[in-house]
């Protein structure tokens, strides 16, 4: 199922969402300018390689500098056009309404926190991996989690291709996002059970970002304006 749009109108211009999309696109364009023979080195240096942090001896032998910067930088790297377009499209669909409830600055900190949590869970669940993980999907999973709780009755207009013919339908947000989370969880469990990466996707990063979103989103919500007191006495 490919999400097309949701049915909740936004209340404010989504400054943070647009900023994140712009930064991701700019970084991706920069990636395209990196000489082909240096692209792999660039991705390994700024992507998230779990063994870099769990096996310091190996990291030192291959020349990794001692820094935790990749937990942040990996959120802004992508592996191709479909990767970045898919991630930014999902951020656009679900991010504007969550930003409405948080405000731009709170939303930005929430997004980054979920991305960092996603990276940490990926390292913990794939400690020996020497394959770089890149992409904003862990942070975006946190945004989806916040949407799941804040707008469960929203409708998601989705498209499902049947023999190359697009079929459009609406599904409640809590069903769409709940199903998405379960696919990430069970796919990640399968990857651990078989001790191999499945489809090259960082499933547990998605689970970690979603979990961080569920646990922390309430801390970033804008305070509700106080309702005026209702007089109860008589003059």
Image: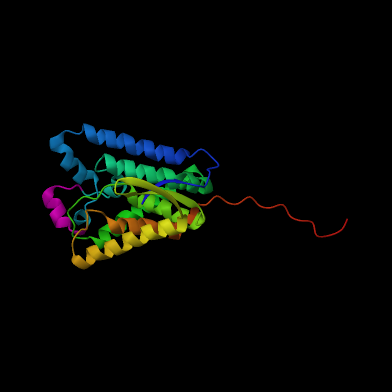
Specify the farthest residue to the top: 33
The residue closer to the viewer here, 8 or 171, is: 171
Q: Is residue 128 magenta?
A: no
Q: Horizontal placement of 81 versus 222: left or right?
A: left
The residue closer to the viewer here, 42 or 60, is: 42
In the rendered image, residue 53, in percent from the top left (x then y), is placed at 22, 56
Looking at the rendered image, the quarter that the C terminus falls into is bottom right
52 versus 36 height, above or below: below
Q: Is residue 56 magenta?
A: yes
Specify the farthest residue to the bottom: 193
Circle count: 0
In the rendered image, residue 182, in percent from the top left (x then y), is placed at 35, 62
**Residue lying at 23% horizontally and 34% vertically, measured from the top left:** 32
192 versus 60 height, above or below: below
In the rendered image, residue 206, in percent from the top left (x then y), is placed at 33, 56
**Residue lying at 55% horizontally and 42% vertically, measured from the top left:** 11
- Span colored in magenta: 54-65
The residue closer to the viewer here, 128 or 12, is: 12
């Amino acid at each position: 199922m490919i999400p097309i749009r949701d049915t909740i109108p936004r209340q404010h211009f989504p400054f943070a969402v647009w900023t994140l999309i712009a930064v991701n696109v700019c970084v991706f364009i920069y990636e395209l300018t990196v000489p082909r023979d240096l692209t792999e080195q660039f991705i390994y240096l700024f992507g998230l390689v779990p063994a870099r942090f769990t096996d310091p001896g190996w990291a030192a032998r291959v020349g990794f500098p001692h820094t935790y910067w990749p937990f942040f930088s990996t959120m802004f790297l992508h592996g191709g056009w479909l990767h970045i377009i898919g991630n930014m499209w999902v951020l656009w669909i679900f991010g504007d309404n969550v930003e409405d409830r948080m405000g731009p600055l709170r939303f930005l900190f929430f997004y980054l926190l979920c991305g960092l949590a996603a990276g940490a869970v990926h390292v913990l669940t794939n400690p020996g991996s020497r394959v770089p993980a890149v992409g904003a999907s862990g942070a975006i999973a946190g945004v989806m989690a916040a949407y799941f709780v804040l707008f469960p009755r929203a409708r998601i207009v989705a498209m499902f291709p049947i023999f190359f013919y697009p079929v459009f339908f609406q599904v409640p947000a809590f069903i769409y996002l709940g199903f998405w989370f379960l696919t990430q969880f069970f796919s990640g469990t399968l990857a651990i059970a078989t001790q191999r990466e499945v489809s090259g996707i960082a499933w547990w990063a998605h689970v970690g970002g979603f979990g961080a979103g569920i646990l922390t989103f309430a801390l970033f919500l804008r305070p509700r304006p106080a309702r005026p007191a209702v007089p109860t006495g008589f003059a």
